[in-house]
Structures are given as C-alpha cells and as structure tokens.
C-alpha cells in the first residue's frame, strides 16, 4: 500500500480537522507551558502528521492577538501559556465539544485500544 493511499484512508472529505488547531493549542497549553516547537511536535503526534512552522506560528499569533495566550522568553525560545481569558475560552470549547459529541464516547476508541481489547478476548 502506498503512502498516498494510507494518507487518504485517514482523511475524510466530510470532516475538516484544520479548524481544531486553535483548540488543540489551547488544550495542550492548559496541560503545560510549551514553546512553538514542542506544541508542533505534540499536536503532530496527535494528528499523525507533522506541522510546519507556517501552520503553528500563525495560529499562535492569532491566539496572542485575541489575548488567549501569552509568552515569556526563555533564551531564544518563546514559551507560551494560557491567559485567564484563554482558560475561560477553553472551558467554553470543552462544553461545546461535550454538546456536539455527547453520546459518541462508546464509538470513539483509539485503534490501539481496540487492538488491545481484541487481543485480550482471544
């Protein structure tokens, strides 16, 4: 199976995940303050795809302009964290996700968890 075929299998023309980037940034920063490279790596691992600087840094800039995140310099790096407004916005987003996806929890299982469950049954 080619790489192109594998990538196509993971994607759906009916669900665009691009709009989740800001949410994922806010979520990750709620767990720990991170620099842009660390955020890119963590979100990339979640999406199973690498994020380019042209993707992550404009999103960080938008979130900073909306005063949802702030940064402090540590040497050459900028370490981002949530502001109080960012924490409030993230709580609203969690509530929206809960409303949108209520009742789907039993359908949403990581593939690795499914495989482990299948092996235990054998």
Image (spheres, rainbow, N blue to C red):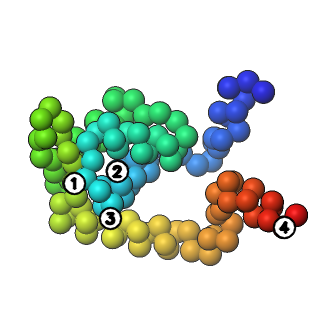
Q: Nearer the viewer, mark 1 or mark 3?
A: 1
Marks 2 and 3, the one that precedes in the sequence: 2
Figure quadrant of the C terminus: bottom right
Q: Is residue 21 in sight in this rendering?
A: yes
Q: CA distance from mark 2 to mark 1?
A: 10 Å
| Residue in view at x 52 percent, y 68 percent | 100
Figure quadrant of the N terminus: top right
Marks 1 and 4, the one that precedes in the sequence: 1
Q: Is residue 64 in sight in this rendering?
A: no
Specify whether 114 is left or right of 63.
Answer: right
Q: CA distance from mark 4 to mark 3?
A: 38 Å
Residue 121, numbered label: 4
**Residue 111 in picture, x, y percent from top left:** 69, 54
**Residue 65 in picture, x, y percent from top left:** 17, 47
Location of residue 43 (image quadrant): top left
User: On the image, numbered disc 3 is attached to which residue?
Assistant: 90
| Residue in view at x 62 percent, y 75 percent | 103
Q: CA distance from mark 2 to mark 3?
A: 10 Å
Q: Nearer the viewer, mark 1 or mark 4?
A: 4
User: On the image, numbered disc 2 is attached to which residue?
Assistant: 25
Marks 2 and 1, the one that precedes in the sequence: 2
Location of residue 42 (image quadrant): top left
SS assignment at label 3: helix
SS assignment at label 1: strand
Circle 4 residues within 10 Å: few <14, some 14–19, many ≥20 = few
Nearest the eye: 74 or 66:
74
User: On the image, numbered disc 1 is attached to which residue?
Assistant: 81
Marks 4 and 3, the one that precedes in the sequence: 3
């Amino acid at each position: 199976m080619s790489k192109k075929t594998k990538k196509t299998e993971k994607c759906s023309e009916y669900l665009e995940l691009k709009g989740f980037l800001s949410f994922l940034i806010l979520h990750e920063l709620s767990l720990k303050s991170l620099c842009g490279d660390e955020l890119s790596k963590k979100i990339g691992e979640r999406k199973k795809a690498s994020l380019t600087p042209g993707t992550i840094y404009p999103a960080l800039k938008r979130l900073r302009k909306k005063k949802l995140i702030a940064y402090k310099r540590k040497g050459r790096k900028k370490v981002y964290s949530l502001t109080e407004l960012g924490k409030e916005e993230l709580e609203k987003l969690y509530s929206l996700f809960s409303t949108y996806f209520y009742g789907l929890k039993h359908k949403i299982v990581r593939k690795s968890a499914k495989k482990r469950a299948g092996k235990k049954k054998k």
